[in-house]
Image: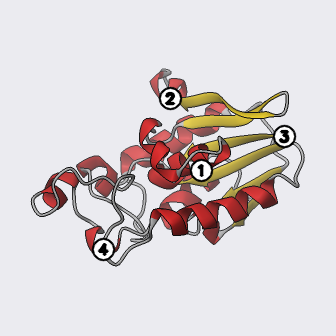
Amino acid sequence: MRIHIFRHGETQWTKSGRHTGWTDIELSPNGIKEAYSLRKSLKNCSFDHVFASPLKRVKETCEIAGLGKQMRVDPSLLEWNYGSYEGLTTDEIRKSDPNWTIFTKDPPMGETKKEVAIRLDMFLEVLKTLKGEIALFSSGHISRAIAARWLGLDVSFGSLFYLSTASRSILGFERENPVILLWNDTSHLSKPE
């Protein structure tokens, strides 16, 4: 069993660095282009299970990537709830909360690291009962937290796993040990049309 993680394509908020948790915004024109590039890279791939966050930007990426018919929407894949920090940039947040990151300090009125860990652990337990190639379409910070939990690490270790928009990553096993097989692959974005 392998878990392929796909981050959604660019939105206006990801481009400007705004924290986009549960705000339901669409892909930007460039994000649509990125999703089509992802589709081309997946033309010879097949997946036994496809899950996506209920957010528009994520479902749209999954559909454009050619996996919409297989897509099962799962709220476990929702991006982190940033609470009062929703829509703000890190620089704006740090004016009142220096050195803040989502991985080091819980956002006011938002989801705690503990709540995220519980949500992801339950979802990963379900995935471990499945066989074959699994595709997950989601957002940046929650995908980084998935990788940390897959490795048995605290959610805060997600800070070590940078993810670009429309990237592909793969989690799997080396023997019985959970490992990262591929991370933040964006090679499909640099290929000529």
Q: What amino acid is labelled 4 in the image?
A: Pro
Query: Mark 1 or mark 3, which has the lower sequence index?
Result: 3
Residue with the mark numbered 2: 186
Q: CA distance from mark 3 to mark 2?
A: 22 Å
**Which amino acid type is shown beneath numbered disc 2?**
Thr
Number of other residues with Cα within 10 Å of mark 3, as a class: few under 14, some 14 to 19, many 20 or more = some
User: Counting residues from the N terminus, which is met first, the one under dot 3 or under dot 2?
Assistant: 3
- Lower sequence index among marks 1 and 4: 4
- Residue 153 visible, this orientation: yes
Number of the front mark, 1 or 3:
1
Q: Secondary structure at mark 1?
A: helix
At label 1, which amino acid type do we have?
Ile
Q: Which residue is mark 4?
A: 108
Q: Position of residue 130 (x, y in %)?
A: 87, 52
- Under circle 4, the secondary element is loop
> Circle 1 sits on which residue?
146
Percent of width and height locating residue 44: 77, 30
Q: Secondary structure at mark 2?
A: loop
- Of circles 2 and 1, which is in front? 1
